[in-house]
Image (cartoon, helix red, strand yellow):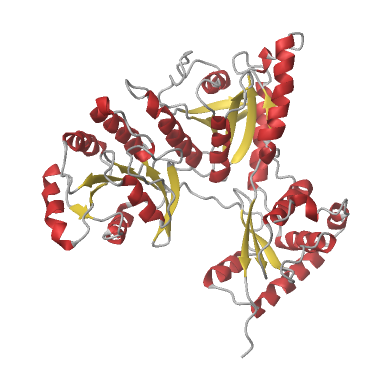
Amino acid sequence: MGTEEEYDAGPDNLEETLADMDEQLADQRATALRASLQDYDLDDEDAVLLEGVGVGEDGIEYLPALPVVAIVGRPNVGKSALVNRILGRREAVVEDTPGVTRDRVTYKAEWLDRRFSLVDTGGWEPDARGIDASVAAQAEVAIDLSDVVLFVVDAMVGATATDEHVVKLLRKSGKPVFLVANKIDDARQEPEAAALWNLGLGEPHPVSAIHGRGVADLLDEVMKVLPTVSAVASAEIGGPRRVAILGRPNVGKSSLLNKAAGEERVVVNELAGTTRDPVDEIVELGGKMWRLVDTAGIRRRVHLSQGADFYASLRTSAALEKAEVAVVVIDVTQPISVQDLNIIDLVLESGRALVIAYNKWDRLNDDDMDGQDRRRFLEREIERDLAHVAWAPRVNISAKTGRHLDKLVPALETALSSWDQRIPTGKFNAFLSELVAEHPHPLRGGKQPRILFGTQAASRPPTFVLFTTGFLDPGYRRFIQRRLREIYGFEGSPIVLNMRIRERRQRS
């Protein structure tokens, strides 16, 4: 499929050419390119996007936090099947063994042109001994972090003691709750659903998650009560910039928060996972106010050690919805782990700005042989495992002693200004045409895909849309992103590059 290097035919004069370019001329050229799109089949969405071009070039687009719908229920009632049905794709793992859903907890979903986050609490199935307490604890966290709850019951089994346990919590929460009577495959089974009225949660919604029966009606009803912006992860516009401090248990997130806040705000204990709730703190750093969203909130209970990862990633997703920039804390005394990489992936997926803080740096003393060895290995690990986020600012700190904490602020400011950055349409198209002239896309099947026009559709994160005549190789898209970074910075911000492949209109 072509690597990035394939397109890089050595040095080019792109930077100089763009620096010397007459901006007025670039704008005129972009206008002409945009006009030539009339020869192609465009859809309504394209029209809306192109309408926005040239308007508020310096404006920053704020994407409010998506509302959250959580799916809760006992093991094996069909939660994951319902998630898949709502997403319209097989994302969650479904098997007959209880407890096979793993890793991903939050998915982006859409219904009636409305986007929302879907939280699948199948992510951790409790052990049989503490099943009541475990399902309830799991439901509690999901309820805390959602705007609407879908409570799934297996209608063919009927309500169990565990279900009644969860009902008490749901009633207390005051959140809108939809009672989903699953496994009603045809009309003859409807009376089974009606029997669930006695749970006292109002009308049961009969569905068959596997066959899709009744799911559309359910979602129509959910949309009526779902807020447009999440009340849980509401993004206040303006005010202090919002920073999420992320990392696996015990890497020093809380110590970092305490040091930044200048006092003991969060209980820090040597036991992994001792922090309870995400605490929002307004702190002053580098002469500026910041809102720190701490996300260590893993609620540990008896028998729940298994569920710690589930909570951690649920908390992380909720915090990222609230935040604008994430500081991922990595413990340099330990090898970089899969969990560290998963957290970074969550940040990339959420489109937030990113800073990486390497904590406990003071333990890698120069005069200590072990420290020197660890430092050498660490640099190799960073090169191998974190090459895909080499654009993220890096700070070496000691959260405990406060060493180099002052370096965090410039890194945050850099990442956020990259995240807010906009490139005017004229400049962006000049960049594309010069780039393609110097490094053309290889022929594919005898044809060469052309880039007709490009525009930055949004900032936060910077999102670019390319109208093309054919599919651009992933390697070529990465090459475009790399050159964008080299010329315009974007240090600390992900860049989203979307393609719209359009056919030439048939002459009638």
* Residue positioned 55% across, 73% down in the render: 43
Q: Nearer the viewer, residue 291 or 15?
A: 15
* Residue under the image location 87 percent in, 51 percent down: 10
Q: Is residue 130 left or right of residue 278?
A: left
- Answer yes or no: is residue 290 visible: no
Q: Is residue 144 something one can see in this rendering?
A: yes
- The residue furthest front is 96
Q: Quadrant of residue 49?
A: bottom right
**Quick check: 262 above or below 462?**
above
| Residue 236, position as x, y percentages in the image | 48, 42
Image coords of residue 467 (percent x, y)? 66, 67
Q: Is residue 308 above or below residue 345?
A: above
480 relative position to 341: left or right: right
Between 68 and 157, which is closer to the camera in this rendering? 157
Relative depth, front residue between 411 and 285? 411
Residue 492 rendering spot, x and y as whole percentages: 67, 39
Query: Which residue corresponds to the image point at 26% horizontal and 29% vertical from the top-left?
Result: 131
